[in-house]
Image: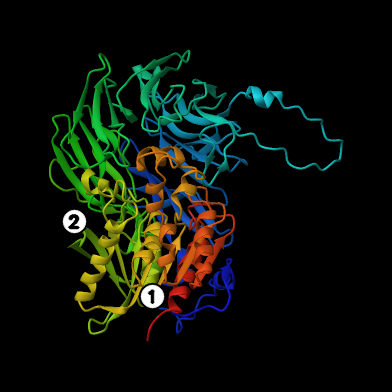
Amino acid sequence: MRQLLIPVVLGLSALTTQLVVAPATAQEAPKTFQAEDIFALEWANDVQISPNGRYVVYVRHGFDIMKDNTKRALWLVDTETGSHTPLFDDQHSYGNPSWSPDGSKLAFSSNRDGRNQIHVYHLATKTSSAITEVTESPRQFSWSPDGKHLAFLMNVAAEKTEYAKAVKKPKAPKGAKWAKPPVIVERTYYQRDGAGVLPDTYSQIFVVPSEGGTARQLTSGAFSHNGPLAWVDGGKALVFSANRNDDWEYQVNESDLWKVAVQDGALTQVTDMPGREWSPISSPNGEQLAFLHRGNEAIPYHNAKLRIMDLDDNDQRELLSDFDRSVDSPLWLSNDRLAIQYADRGRYKLAEVRLNGNKNEWVDDVGGVSVSRPYMSGMFSVAAGGNKVAYTRGSSYRPADVAVFDIPRRGAAKPQSFTALNDDVLGHRQLGKVHEFTYNSSFDDTEIHGWYITPPDYDPNKKYPLLLEIHGGPHLAYSPMFAAEQQRYAAEGYIVFYNNYRGSTSYGAEHALKLDGFYSSERDHADHMSGIDVLIEKGMVDPNNLFIAGGSAGGIATAYAVGLTDRFNAAAATNPVINWISKTLTADSYLGQITNQFPAMPWEDYDHYWKRSPLSMAGKVNTPVMLFSGENDRRVPMSEIEQFYQALQLRKVDTAMVRVPDASHGVTARPSNMIAKIEHTLAWFKLYHKK
């Protein structure tokens, strides 16, 4: 083992800042995927097809190399001519496109006036104007059936508490520079990763005339109301999801559907089932409501089920009751059929469901919206006539493009891609080849589904170093879609292995719950190691050069693994939980995590929390570990990696801590930080390659 002479604590150093270089000459042009190529990546999201099916407006995402952030522009695709033109593509940010019912107008959000407002674009005149003048960012837009109003959600400040009112403080003299005032926290849910300590606000429902005017608040009270917002009763009311019980913050597995009258704000509770009801959408004739439901058992995963309600008598029925997958994003095609999205074996699929329960699968390549790592992602929309669908279409070698298909009467759809957003950069790079395989875990013979990427110019007669990269969640899933991180590792000569270990979604409830009470543990560790052994047996992997990495839940698994085995040359753990006792009592996710993932409060079952903590095995770690985390992370606070760093330093284990300033749990949200994570990992692993 290589011993560092002094502790290594890294910031984002010259390693990061030197990555962006001038374009190479034609003679020097690299063949493989490079770090600077990440800034050139683009992807489509929020694709919205017009009611007549001719146009698709979408949010075109890309990275701004000068501002080091994500650009969001609105582009328009004409599905008849194939023309692809910008609606709004400038220094401002655009999002949330939503067609009016007649297709003549398009609502969207933009900060072009200094702060986010709702704007409406008129296709006939090619003009637009802001229709709101609000102080907070509006979201979850929903057009009224007659197109005369837009409903939306917006945060509203709560009334000051008695304690806050009681605090008296003299005013500062003119010109004085006093410290910032203290922040009073009395809420149960008081912080959120990426936002910090939250202002005392609650999400409320508003309506505004689509031609502009004063936004009128419909709901009130110390409750958070959630979209999407469904117009019912001929445009006289809106249905939404909320928990309006006094102890709602503690009831993490409960929410109901409510109806608010547009005229006077009168509230009516629509559902009262155990568990959560959400995602309501009204049928074209206004007689039925589709929505999603899941149970309230204190477990970390539930399948979302599709339910239909008759609005005249509130009678309900469940569709696809025996379908062991989670249904997402129901949209009506006609009064007797819906389109749904669901996750199945690492892929998002689109399908039609009829009210008699018959299901017909259309496509299985929805994805490409997560460009950093290959998480399942993507979305779709349907034309009002129920004859066309637009969606984000991804592949193993390209992020999401805009695709459209005519809805088939039966069988699979035949989609057509209307964009090729990354051919300009990826079309000139040799990418690693993505291979799919399954194997059985040595722990209990559970089938594990995974992928591995072979490096460009792969030679089957050679053996390559292996990099295991573990996904977060753990109740999420990887897919075979393009991923900048995995392709970058492959470009540097690694066979990159990733899988959907036990606990992953898209394989049914039983698979997702196989980590319940054992996260992380020898069980998921066996899932990973068994896959490595299979690849070694194939003769492609050098068993003397094994490396492990992962983020969030994958970071936990990485930190746990090096306490169980010395087989890895080095490890890179991004924002891992190290001590579940300290994590759950300092993180923003404490309410749901303690309720659903642990048998009791930390002080009531200390042994369980400690056994699941990588810190409990710090005394067994000999593997060099690099820890990477955002300094503003509130999902897994920075103190977690500090505990592991200091524990391993006390044991004189090679350790590096990379602290990312101003970054939250989504530490790779800014492109330079994504690059930094990749290149720091590569640099760390290079130190421990065996010849």
Cα–Cα gap, marks 2 and 1: 27 Å
Label 2: how many Cα within 10 Å (few below 14, some 14–19, many 20+): some
Residue at position x 49%, y 20% from top?
218
Image mark for residue 569:
1
Instruction: Indicate left or right for 644 with 534 as reference.
Output: right
Q: Quadrant of residue 319?
A: top left
247 shown above or below 689: above
Label 1: how many Cα within 10 Å (few below 14, some 14–19, many 20+): many
147 shown above or below 653: above
The x, y position of residue 634, in whole percent, is: 52, 48
Observer-nearest residue: 565 or 549? 565
Residue at position x 60%, y 40% from top?
115
Observer-nearest residue: 464 or 531? 531
**Considering only order in the chain, which callout, 1 or 2, is on the residue closer to the N terminus?**
2
Quadrant that contains the N terminus: bottom left
| Residue type marked 1 | Asn
Q: Quadrant of residue 99?
A: top left
Observer-nearest residue: 429 or 120? 429
Q: Quadrant of residue 231?
A: top left
Quadrant that contains the C terminus: bottom left
The x, y position of residue 388, in whole percent, is: 26, 41
642 shown above or below 236: below
Q: Are marks 2 and 1 in contact (CB under 8 Å)?
A: no
The x, y position of residue 597, in whole percent, is: 36, 43
User: Which of the colour schemes (rainbow, by chain, secondary structure, one colour) is used?
Assistant: rainbow
198 shown above or below 44: above
Image mark for residue 602:
none
The x, y position of residue 551, in whole percent, is: 42, 58
How many dots with numbers?
2
Mark 1: secondary structure: loop
Q: Which residue is mark 2?
A: 446
